[in-house]
Amino acid sequence: MRRLGSLADWRQRLDWRYLARLLASLALTLLLVGLIFDLAGADPVAAFEALIRGSLGNPLGVEQTIELGAILVLAGLAVTIPARASLWNIGGEGQIFAGALAAASVALKVTGPDPAIVMLLALLAGLLAGAAVAAVAGALRALTGANEVLTTLMLNFVIALLTFYAITNWFPAAGIRGSTPEIPRDVELPTLLGGDITSGVLLALACVVAAHVLLTRTRLGLTIRAVGANPEAARHNGIRLGSVYTVSFAIGGAFAGLAGAIVVLGIDGLLARDFSPGYGFVGIAVALLARSRPLLVVPAAALFSIVTVGGSYLESAVGLSADVALVIQGTLLLLLLALWVIPPQRAAGVR
Amino acid sequence: MSRHSIGNRWQALIAAACALALALGVAACGDSDSSTSGSTDGGEGSADAVEVAMVTSGAHTDSSFVQSWWEGSQQAQSELGDAAKIVWNDGLNSLDALDRAAGAALTNGAEALIFTTSEAPQLVTEYAEKFPDAWVCGLEAPREDYLANVCTMLPQYWEGAFLAGALAGLVTETDRVGVVSAFDIPVQNLQVEGFALGARYTNPDVKIERAITESLIDSGKARAATQAQLAAGADVILSAVDEAAQGMYLAARDAGGYVIPQYTDQYESAPDVVLTSVVYHHDEVGATLAKLAVEGELEAKSYEFDLATYGVGELAPFRGATGEAVSEEARKQVAEIQKEIEDGTIIFPGLEELGERGSGESISVASLKGGT
Amino acid sequence: MVELLLTTTVLLTVPLLLATLGEIVTERAGVLNIGIEGVMLFGAFAAAGVIQLGPGRPVAVLAAAALGAALGVLLAVLFVARRVNQIVGGVLFNLFALGLTTVLFDRYFDAGATGSVFGKLALPLLSDLPVVGPALFDQPLLAYLSVVLAGLVWWLLTRTWFGLHLRAAGERPRALDSAGVSVGGIRTAALAVGCALVALGGAALVVLQSGAFTPNITEGRGFIALGIVLVARWSPWWALPAVALFGLAESVKFQASTFGLESVPPEFLAMLPYLVAIVTVTVGTAARYPAALGVPYVRE
C-alpha cells in the first residue's frame, strides 16, 4: 500500500465539495427511499430500523449478512478484474451458474476419493467452469470483435437453461422439487469454528487478497491495468490485447464460478434451479461502488449485503416486499454516479 | 495508482462508513423497543397472539396456485381473530430470498413457519434445527423420518389431474388431448403424467400432447404452446402454468377447444372455454394447517390432503355452454372414477415414478386397479 | 403448419419489436441503453396500473408511452448530462426498476382483479389471403401499429432533420457540435423517443398477452432486444425480419412434435433464440456500430 502522505496532503484531498456531494447522495437516497417506503404503505423510520435490526441486530441476520457478503465479494471481483482492462463482465450470472453446476456435479458424482478431496475438486471445478464460460466471451471478443456485453448477456440465459436441464436429467430426483439431492455433509464446506457460517467466507477474503496482489504486484495485473488505461499505447508496446481480454475475463469468471461453488457447497448444500437472485448483476454494482479496487469490494459488498438481508425482514416487520432492497441499492448507486461521487471514467465506449 | 486515486479510495471508505453511521443514526431515532408489527394482510392480534408465517414464491395475484394459499391465510386470520397473527410473505422468487424470509419470520417471533411452495425442503430441516421451539412445515413428499418440530403436507395433485385427464379422455372428439406445463420438474410432472394416465384410463386410443413454456407468468408462450397443440388436433388442454393460463384461454377462443385450469375455479375468467377447473382447495389446506399451528396441535408427520379427505382435486361444477359438452354419461363415469380414487380402488404409482416425464404413457393402466 | 408458425411468431414478437425499435433510435444517437429491461418493466406496470384504475386500454397504452418518455429524460440526465457509464447505469436502473415495480405492485395491485386484453382486428380482404391472411392480417391493432411505427422510425431517422442530427450524434458528434447543434439535446430527445417506444413494448406485453402485471413480467425480453438491434444492423426495416427470426425460434419450440423434435429437451429448444443472437453477434460484426456508441460526449 502506498504511503499516505502528510496531514497537509490529506486536507487537500478531502475536497469539501466532494464530501458535500457524497453527503448529498446519502441524504437524497434516504429521502427518496423514505418516500418510496411511505408510498408503499410503511413507516419510513420503522422500516429503516427494521433493516438494520434484521441484518445486524440478531445472530441469524449477522450470519446471513456475512454469507451473502462473501458471495457478493466474489461477484464483485468477477467484474472488477475485467473492469481494470476496461471490459464489462455482464455475464457474472451465467458464470456463477456454471460454477454451481460444475461443483454440484463433482460433489454428487465423484465418490471414490476422500470427501475432503472431493470437496476441493468441486471447488476447483466451479472455478474452472466459470473461467471457461467467461473465456468464451473474452475469446469471441478477441477473435471476432463480438461485443462482450451482448455475448455475455445471452450466455447468461443459455447457461441457466443448461443448468435447469442438468438438474432434471443429470441427477437423481430429490422428492418433488426442482433441485439436485443434497450434497453429503462431509463433502460440504466446513463451517467456521463449529458455528453456522461457512468457511467459504474465508475463501472469499482470500480471493480479495489474491486479486489485489494480482493487480498490484504481478506482471499480468500491471498488463491488464495498462490495457485498461490506454489500449492503443499498450498495443504499440507489443501487448496482445486479445490475450489480455481473454485472460482477464477468465480470471473474472473464475471468481464468479467460485461463488457458485460456494453457494452449492457451503450455503445451500445442493443446487436448486432458482438459487440466484441475480448475484451476477448485483456484483456489477458492488464493483462499481468499490471503484474496481479489490480491497474496497469488501466494504461495498458488506453494504449491499446489509441492505439485502435487512430488506428480507421488512415483510414481517412492516409489510414491505423484500425487493425494496433493490430499490435502495439502485437509488444509492445511481445517485452516487449522478452526483459524481463515483466519477465518470475515461469512457472506453462499446469497442 | 495516482495520488488522486489514493484519496478517492479513502474517501470511498469514508463514504461507506458515513452511510452506515447515517443509517444507524436514523435507526436510533426510531422506536427500537416497539414491536413494529404491520403486516398488510394479517390483523394486529392481541399481545399473546400466536404468530404463524406463510412464505412462498410467486405472487398472490396469480388467480391460481399462490392466490389460493393466500386466501387460506386470510381465511385462517378471520376465523382465528385475535388469537392469531398470520403473516403472509410471497414474491420470494429465489432460494436465497426464501431462506432469508424464513429466517426473518422465525426471528421475528413466528411460532410456526409454513412453506407453501415445494422448492425448499432443506430449508425446512435447517430452520427446524435452528429454532427448535417453533414448528416448520413444508410442501413436500412424505419424509422417512421427522424431527420433532417438522411437519410436511402434500395435496395429492395427481389425483385431481387424473380426474381431469379422465374427463378429457371422455370429452375429446379427436382422441387428442394436451397439457401445457412450465418446468420439467417432478412436482409439475406429477400433474402432467397424472393427466395423461387419466386420459388413457377412459380413452385407450388417446394421444397426449405436452409442452413446456419455462415460465409460470408468460401467457404469450402459454398461448403459443396451446395454439400448437390445438393445431395438432388436441381439443382439451390442461393448464399447469398458473397465471399464464390467461394466454391459453385466448388461444382456445381463437381455435376452438377447451382448457382445464388448475388450483382455483376459473370458470368466470373464460366461461366460453373453461370446461372445468381442478380445485385443490389450497385455502382449506392452508387454513387447516395454520389453525392447527395456532392451537398447538401440529404433529411431526406427513399431512396428506386428497380427494377423500378435503375434496382436494375435485372438479369444479360443469356449467354453461362448456358444461353442455359433457354428456350425462361422461359425468357419471367421472363421478365413478372419483369414487374409485377415494375408496382406494384406483392405486397410483409412487411419486418418483409418476414424477418422470413421459411416465403417463409408460405406466400400464391396468396396474392402477390394485391387484389386477 | 406455416400458418400457425406465423401466427405464433407475430404474437410473440410485438413487444419485442417495439422495444427493438426504441433501442435502435437510442443507439443510433450514440447511447447504449442497457436499462431497456427496466423501462419495459415500467411500461408494463404503468399499463396494468391504468387498466386497474379504469380508463381503459388505449389510455393505458398512452400512459405507458408517456412514462417511457419521462424515463428517457431521466436516463438522459444520467447518461448525457452526468456522463454516467452507460452499461453500469443501465444495469443499476434495471435493478431499481425491478425493485420499485415489485414493491408498488405488492402494495397496490389486488388479487382477483382481472386484466383485459385487446381483441383482434381483421383487415378486410387481406385477412382472407391463404396462409398469411389470418396469421398476419388478423391481429390486434397494436400489432399493425408496431409495423407502422417501424416505418415511422425509418422515416424519422432518414427523412427528417432530427433524424439527420440523431445519426450524426451517434456517428460524428464532434461534427454535429461544430455545426452548432447540441449533441446532448439530440441524445436526450432520442432517449425520450426511444424509451417511449420501449415502454410501449412493455405495455404491449400486458395488453396483448396477459392483461395483468406480475413481478418481472419482462423476463429478459429487454436483453433480447439488445441482441436483435445488432442482428438488425440498427435498421428499423431489418428489425422486422430480425424479430421474426427470434419469434420463429421460439415458436418452433412449441411445434416440436410437428418438426420431429420431440426428443429434444425443452430447455435446449428454449436456448435457440439466445444462441441465434450470439451467433449473429459473432458472425456479423462486420456491421458498423454507430461510431460513438456508448461514449459520453464531452465538449472541448
Image (cartoon, grey):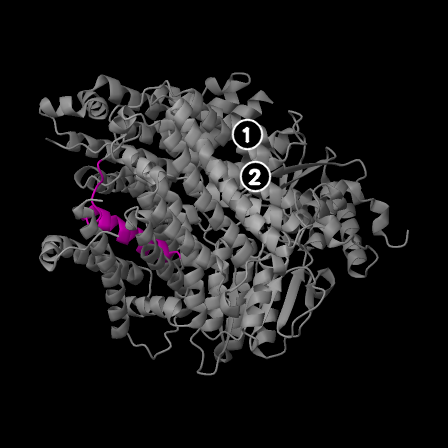
Horizontal and vertical percent position of residue C296:
21, 34
Give the image quarter of residue B130: bottom right
| Amino acid type of the residue that numbered disc 1 sits on in the rendered structure | Ser
Residue at point 51%, 20% (across, down):
C133
| Amino acid type of the residue that numbered disc 2 sits on in the rendered structure | Leu
Q: Residues within 10 Å of mark 2 (few under 14, many from 20)?
A: some
Comparing labels 1 and 2, the label whose residue is closer to the camera: 2
Horizontal and vertical percent position of residue A193:
50, 69
Please tell me the numbered disc located at residue A165. Answer: none
Q: Chain of mark 2?
A: A
Please tell me the numbered disc located at residue A162. Answer: 2
Q: Is B133 rendered above or below residue A281?
A: below
Horizontal and vertical percent position of residue C58:
35, 38
Q: In terms of secondary structure, where does tag 2 sit?
A: helix
Front residue of this view, candidates B261 and C234: C234
Horizontal and vertical percent position of residue C52:
38, 50
User: Which span is picked out in magenta?
Assistant: A323-346
Q: Is residue A342 magenta?
A: yes
Q: Is residue B363 magenta?
A: no
Left or right of residue B35, residue A36 in this image: left
Tell me the residue that label 1 is attached to: C251
Give the image quarter of residue A221: top left
Q: In terms of secondary structure, where does tag 1 sit?
A: helix
Asked if residue B19 can be seen in this view, the reply is: yes
Q: Chain of mark 1?
A: C
